[in-house]
Image: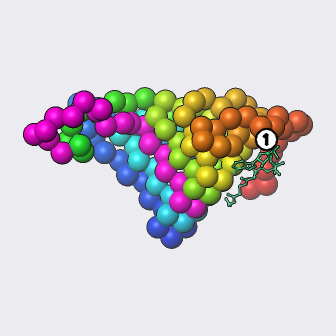
Amino acid sequence: MWLNEGAKFILTHSGDVNSELVIGDFFFMNSYSIIDCHFKITIGHRVQVGPHCYIADFDHDLKVDVNQAFHRMHKTYKAVVIKDNVWIGAGVTILKGVTIGQNSVIGAGSVVTTDIPDNVIAVGIPAKVVKVLEGNYGTYDK
Ligand SMILES: CC(C)(COP(=O)(O)OP(=O)(O)OC[C@H]1O[C@@H](n2cnc3c(N)ncnc32)[C@H](O)[C@@H]1OP(=O)(O)O)[C@@H](O)C(=O)NCCC(=O)NCCS
C-alpha cells in the first residue's frame, strides 16, 4: 500500500454500527484523499485513487433536529465497493451505496452517485459512462 502526504482513512463507530474497511493488494492513494468509513467500504486489488478525492459510505440525516449538531444526528449507511484495477482520477467524490466495476476509470472531478459497470470510463456530475474499454485491462504492472 502507498499513501501520499495527507491521505487518510477515517474509521468511525456510530452507535451500534461497526465500521469495516477492506483494502486489497497494491493500493495507492494520492495526496489529501480521504476514505471516510462509518459502515463498510471494500476496495479490490490494484486500485489507484488520485489526489483530493473523498469516498464515504454514509449520509447525515436530512431531518433537522434543532437540538443536535448534524454530526451527532442519525446517519444512513450503504456499503461502497470498488472492484479490482479501478483508477479514480483527481478530485472525485464517491457517495454511499455505489459499486464501481473492475477495470473502470472515473474521470477527474466526477461525483459518483450510482453504480458504474466493469470496463468503462465514467465522468461528470453525476458520473455517466462515456466509453467502454475493450480488451484486457486487468493486468496492470505491480
Ligand atoms: C477520464 C479520462 C481518463 C478520459 O480520458 P480519454 O479516454 O482520453 O477520454 P476523452 O478525453 O476522449 O474524453 C471522452 C469524453 O469525456 C469527456 N471527459 C473526459 N474527462 C472528463 C472529466 N474528467 N470530466 C468531465 N468530462 C470528461 C471529454 O470531454 C469527452 O467528451 P466529448 O466526447 O463530448 O468530447 C481523463 O479525461 C481524466 O479525467 N483523467 C484523470 C486525470 C487525473 O485525475 N490524473 C491525476 C492522477 S491520479
**Front in this rendered view, residue 90 or 35:** 90
x%, y% of residue 140?
78, 50
Tell me the chief SS of the magenta region. Answer: loop
Q: Is residue 18 magenta?
A: no
- Farthest residue, direction bottom: 5
Which image quadrant for residue 71? top left
| Amino acid beneath label 1 | Gly
**Magenta-colored stretch includes residue 48:** yes
In magenta, the rendered stretch is 46-69
Q: Can residue 23 be seen in the rendering of this structure?
A: no
Q: Nearer the viewer, residue 125 or 26?
A: 125
Q: Residues within 10 Å of mark 1 (few under 14, many from 20)?
A: some
Say which residue label 1 marks.
Answer: 138
- For label 1, being within 8 Å of ligand 1 is answered no
Q: Position of residue 123 (x, y in %)?
A: 69, 43
Compared with residue 99, is residue 23 higher up or lower down, i.e. above or below? below
Whether residue 120 is visible here, answered yes or no, is yes
Q: Would you place residue 53 above or below residue 125 in this image?
A: below
**Picture quadrant where residue 102 is located:** top right
Q: Secondary structure at mark 1?
A: loop
Rendering coords of residue 8 (x, y %): 44, 59
- Which quadrant is the C terminus positioned in? bottom right
Residue at 70% from the left image edge and 29% from the top image edge: 117
Quadrant placement of the N terminus: bottom right
